[in-house]
Amino acid sequence: MMILIVDDKSENLIALSKTLESRGFQIDTAISGEEALKKVLKHPYDLIILDVQMPGMDGFEVAEAIGGYSKTADIPIIFLSAVNVSKEFITKGYASGGRDYLVKPFDTDILVLKIKTFIKLNQVQQSLQTEIEQRKLAESKKDEFISIASHELNTPLTSVKGYLQLAENSLGKQRLDQTKIFLERSKKQVDKLNHLVADLLDTTKIASGKIKFNYQHFELEPFMQNAIESIRHSYPGKQITTTGVSLSGISLLGDENRLEQVMLNYLSNAIKYAPDSNEVTVDVQLLPDKHLQVSVIDQGIGISHERQLQLFEKFYRVEENANRFQGLGMGLYICAEIIKRHQGTYGVQSETGKGSTFYFKIPINPVMADLN
């Protein structure tokens, strides 16, 4: 706890400093109001003990100035005075922002008790203020998410309705080829809707701790091939290249379906955020510490460093791309939770305009007791 003592008499500063230092407090001093203001703006203090009668700026003026700065307004101030002891001055002390007004001579034990009480109360106040601010962020994100979710869910629903109407008209005119095209387009929109709803359900399960994992041994090579082929089927014009070690004959203990969910999300993001590129690379490495590392590399728009730290947060969407690319902003959050449940790590390496590399690393044979 750092306390600033302000008094124009050096003997008072020395005496009170020694007394409080003997009680375990860290002490700084100022010989005038002007010096006190300079120090308060440069250093964080937990409490200020302020003499009232000083040449130049008196204690009341110093307190009012401290209260006028947002970064110092909440520092508790205790006034000390041997001269100005009337009710008028005590009232002025509280009005200028003081938490207490002690008259010299004072009981040292009472001063120490007041110091500890005011510092603790201030810490509680700051903690509550931080919690309130965090909740206001949380509420803002929730409101924004509801708006995004309504839009993202409504878009495929509207498309399905329109395509089915077109299919119905084509069928009535015996235009079966057109009917088939419209039904196929409807199916794609239903698949998109299903994916959005699945993300919503997964996020809800993660928040409530009810998401289930089925850990079993499975072969890595067919797992990787199935994920890549699924993306190739959905994006036939894209080229997905694999590099790294051969996975033939290697098995992994984990939830195959959940890890495939991670792969599909990484791959689909790599394609979505690289609209002007047809190439995506999947690099697979077996590390010396018996971990599997998978990296998905694109040649897309890239991500600024300040945005990278937020990508795996719930509901986060890069603002400048929010209107350009669809999504609820939950995919990478779900991926992060899946990887963490496999005792793994995840991350991104990227530079604006130069593509991105999303990766995860998980143990080949984790300890089962640590997975649950």
Image (spheres, helix red, strand yellow):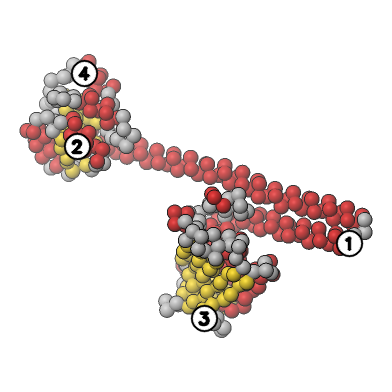
Label located before the other in sequence (2 or 3): 2
Label located before the other in sequence (4 or 1): 4
Residue sitting nearer the eye, 80 or 117 = 80
Whether residue 258 can be seen here: no
* Residue corresponding to mark 3: 245
Q: Amino acid at mark 1?
A: Leu
Label located before the other in sequence (1 or 3): 1
Could you tell me residue 92's position as x and y percent? Answer: 25, 19
Q: CA distance from mark 4 to mark 3?
A: 80 Å
Extreme residue in the bottom direction: 249
* Residue corresponding to mark 2: 4
Q: CA distance from mark 2 to mark 3?
A: 63 Å
* Residue corresponding to mark 1: 176
Label located before the other in sequence (4 or 3): 4
* Residue corresponding to mark 4: 89
Quarter of the N terminus within the rendering? top left
Could you tell me residue 105's position as x and y percent? Answer: 11, 26
Q: Amino acid at mark 3?
A: Val
- The answer to which image quadrant residue 77 occupies is top left
Question: SS for tag 1?
Answer: helix
Q: CA distance from mark 1 to mark 3?
A: 48 Å
